[in-house]
Image (cartoon, grey):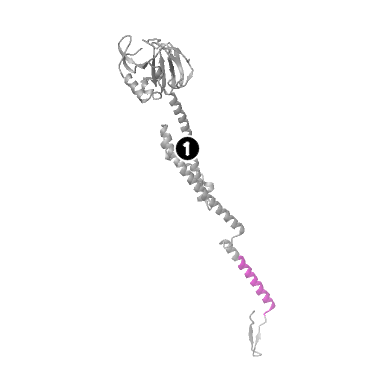
């Protein structure tokens, strides 16, 4: 209810009601509406400026942003779990696999080295969540790099494993004659009496006496490099190149069962015992070369002799008796 205003009329000595003028009333209404509109616009602007009111679009964007932040948290947790598994693999790689295959361990600083040069993450800067996005990206790229290094390391281990397997099959590891075919192990590696001159001379192999025609077997995988009688004193003999610096020689054969260039496996029949060349009686003269040097063959029988058989052979081989060639 609007207030009624009065004024004192001195002529009539009474109070009279003030009647507002029509133009002034319209002006007042106009001023009021204008002020109200200005106030409303200003208030709305302030509310929007200080985020007192959130629009539906902003609400949708906020929910989407929260969802992205949640997904980033899940991604970081998964990457942490992956990193733990990767640490375990890297540890076994350095301390088991690479040690076993005699490969140098990969330094920790090489596995976790960062990326140098220009700022790789400049395009990710300037946003509200730039720190989170950049940190996650760095962690992901570090894991990717470690995975690449580990993958290459496992490829190398696989290759070394294959080479190790080839090496183990190539090493001359068995006796070239079966024990049941042996008459005796006549002479070992070392200084022996020459059967023809009786002079003391170095005997570079081992002599196994056996009947003529007794089968002789390859002591390791390899390729036949020679199968001829064109080497002084050896008569008919075979040389097998096993690779990795190993060569074996089988001398005084009666006949061959292989030819030059033929690939053989450990245990393959390669020839037969005889007494060709500089030989006093049927026997096999067996030599082992490592990196061009003649070595004691008795150290390479771990694949075919029991401990007791090896002990008995070692006792005979060390006796300085007379050789058969």
Relative depth, front residue between 179 and 238:
179
Query: Which residue is labeled 1 in the image?
Result: 150
Q: Residue 2, located in which quarter of the rendered image? A: bottom right
Q: Which residue is drawn at 42% across and 36% down?
A: 96
- Residue 264 lies, in percent from the top left, at 47, 20
Q: Residue at x 64, y 69 (%)?
A: 34
Would residue 119 be visible to someone looking at this image? Answer: no
Q: In the figure, is residue 2 to the left or right of 181?
A: right
- Residue 253 lies, in percent from the top left, at 42, 12
- Residue 158 lies, in percent from the top left, at 47, 32
23 in relation to 116, above or below: below
Part of the protein shown in magenta: 20-41
220 in relation to 158, above or below: above
Q: Residue 53, located in which quarter of the rendered image? A: bottom right
Residue that protrudes farthest toward the top in the picture: 196
Q: Quadrant of the C terminus?
A: top left
Q: Is residue 29 magenta?
A: yes
């Amino acid at each position: 209810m609007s207030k009624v205003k009065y004024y004192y009329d001195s002529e009539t000595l009474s109070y009279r009601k003030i009647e507002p003028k029509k133009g002034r009333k319209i002006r007042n209404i106009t001023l009021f509406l204008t002020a109200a509109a200005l106030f409303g616009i200003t208030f709305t602007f302030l509310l929007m400026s200080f985020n007192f009111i959130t629009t539906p679009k902003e609400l949708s964007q906020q929910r989407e942003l929260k969802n992205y932040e949640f997904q980033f948290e899940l991604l970081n947790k998964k990457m942490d779990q992956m990193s733990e598994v990767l640490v375990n693999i890297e540890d076994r790689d350095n301390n088991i696999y690479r040690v076993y295959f005699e490969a140098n361990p990969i330094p920790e600083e090489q596995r976790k080295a960062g990326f140098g040069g220009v700022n790789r993450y400049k395009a990710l800067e300037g946003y509200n969540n730039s720190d989170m996005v950049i940190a996650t990206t760095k962690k992901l790229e570090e894991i990717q790099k470690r995975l690449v290094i580990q993958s290459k390391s496992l490829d190398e281990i696989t290759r070394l494993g294959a080479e190790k397997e080839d090496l183990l099959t190539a090493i001359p590891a068995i006796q070239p004659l079966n024990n049941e075919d042996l008459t005796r192990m006549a002479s070992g590696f070392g200084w022996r009496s020459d059967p023809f001159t009786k002079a003391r001379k170095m005997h570079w192999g081992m002599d196994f006496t056996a009947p003529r025609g007794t089968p002789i077997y390859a002591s390791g995988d390899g390729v036949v490099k020679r199968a001829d009688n064109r080497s002084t004193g050896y008569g008919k003999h075979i040389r097998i190149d096993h690779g990795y610096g190993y060569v074996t020689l089988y001398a005084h054969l009666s006949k061959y069962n292989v030819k030059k260039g033929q690939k053989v496996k450990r245990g393959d029949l390669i020839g037969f015992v005889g007494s060709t060349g500089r030989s006093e009686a049927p026997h096999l003269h067996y030599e082992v070369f490592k990196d061009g040097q003649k070595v004691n063959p008795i150290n390479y029988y771990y694949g075919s002799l029991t401990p007791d058989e090896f002990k008995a052979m070692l006792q005979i081989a060390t006796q300085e008796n007379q050789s058969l060639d």
